[in-house]
Amino acid sequence: MKLGMVGLPNVGKSTLFNALTNAGAESANYPFCTIEPNVGIVSVPDERLDKLAEMYNPKKFTPATLEFVDIAGLVKGASKGEGLGNKFLSNIREVDAIVHVVRCFEDTNIIHVDGNINPKRDIETIDLELIFSDAEIIERKVERTKKLIKGDKKYAIDLAFLEKLLEHLNNGKPARSFEMTEEEKEILKDVPLLSMKPVIYAANLSDKDFSNGIEDNKYYNQVKEIAEAEGSAVLPICAQIEAEISDMNDEDKQMFLEDLGLEISGLNRIIKTGYSLLGLISFLTAGEPEVRAWTITKGTKAPQAAGKIHTDFEKGFIRAEVVAFDDLIECGTMTAAKEKGLVRSEGKEYVMKDGDIVLFRFNV
């Protein structure tokens, strides 16, 4: 999973990126501090892997990973090449989902690029640049489709859909809020729309907000309304808190979070939300050589899941020996799980489930 972190200059984006990844990206109080996108790779926490490691004592332990990309701060006119516009847009095109950092705190020591705090305006500034870029792409596709109709009337359906989508974009609304059928999505398969990407709004609050109650923060409530209206996710987060806990050991970190009324860190909440937004799950492989998590999309069948490990596994797929994580833990060993008939032999049509522990049988 690859998440692109975006936001206006000086909203706390690079501070949050550094805290989440410990990647040491430069962070400062001036626009365009981030020019080349910084990349940080973090392990996805998974208690199931930890328990399997205790069971097998493997030589190798490999959790799933998540890639954060800290993308340059955006200004108005990016879709027309202003600031670092073209570079910004091409960087976003490469990610699976967007973490949009929105400033929801006041601090006279940190300059806001537009002079005052206004989450609605800030979100619109970035959204509109993505929408303008998408509108240009759809306009070109409309023109190409009109030419195709002259040779084949079946393209009239495509044209009607594209013109409705273009009208939606021209009204300043992102593509992700436009309802589409699976057939209509197929029309866009070769069109990488930026405003179609799933969004997690990271509402950057002050540490006082977490102590006093985030619901009292009017800026956070503005972000919540916007997210709900377009079906996006919103997470209250404090870049400063995340920076403070990034170097703590697990015990101190947990105590610190509990004092603030938080169960898990901002990183873990972003990971959890990202998996949900993108429809991702993990299956596990376990043994003495290695305990490992593999990320796949919901609905993936066994042969394609096997292909995540190695293409030969998919080509020569015979069957998958599957046991649910909870069943294995309850039995204590794979042998005991087999004796109770809890290890199943599944074929090519088996749809993988989150937490499946699998041994693939193949022949090439």
Image (spheres, rainbow, N blue to C red):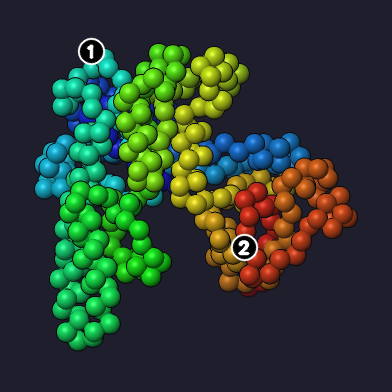
Q: Nearer the viewer, residue 288 or 335?
A: 335
Q: Position of residue 244 (x, y in %)?
A: 44, 17
Determine whether the residue tagged by mark 1 lies in a helix, strand or loop: loop
- At horizontal 44% and vertical 38% (from top left) the residue drawn is 41
- At horizontal 46% and vertical 14% (from top left) the residue drawn is 211
- At horizontal 67% and vertical 40% (from top left) the residue drawn is 48
Graded by Cα atoms within 10 Å as few (under 14), some (14 to 19) or many (20 or more), the crowding at tag 1 reads few
Q: Position of residue 353 (x, y in %)?
A: 63, 55
Determine whether the residue tagged by mark 2 lies in a helix, strand or loop: loop
For badge 1, the amino acid type reads: Asn
- List the residue tagged with mark 1: 109
- At horizontal 12% and vertical 42% (from top left) the residue drawn is 77
For badge 2, the amino acid type reads: Val
Whether residue 25 is visible to the viewer of this picture, yes or no, is: no
Q: Position of residue 232 (x, y in %)?
A: 39, 43
Whether residue 231 is visible to the viewer of this picture, yes or no, is: yes
Q: Is residue 273 above or below residue 108?
A: below
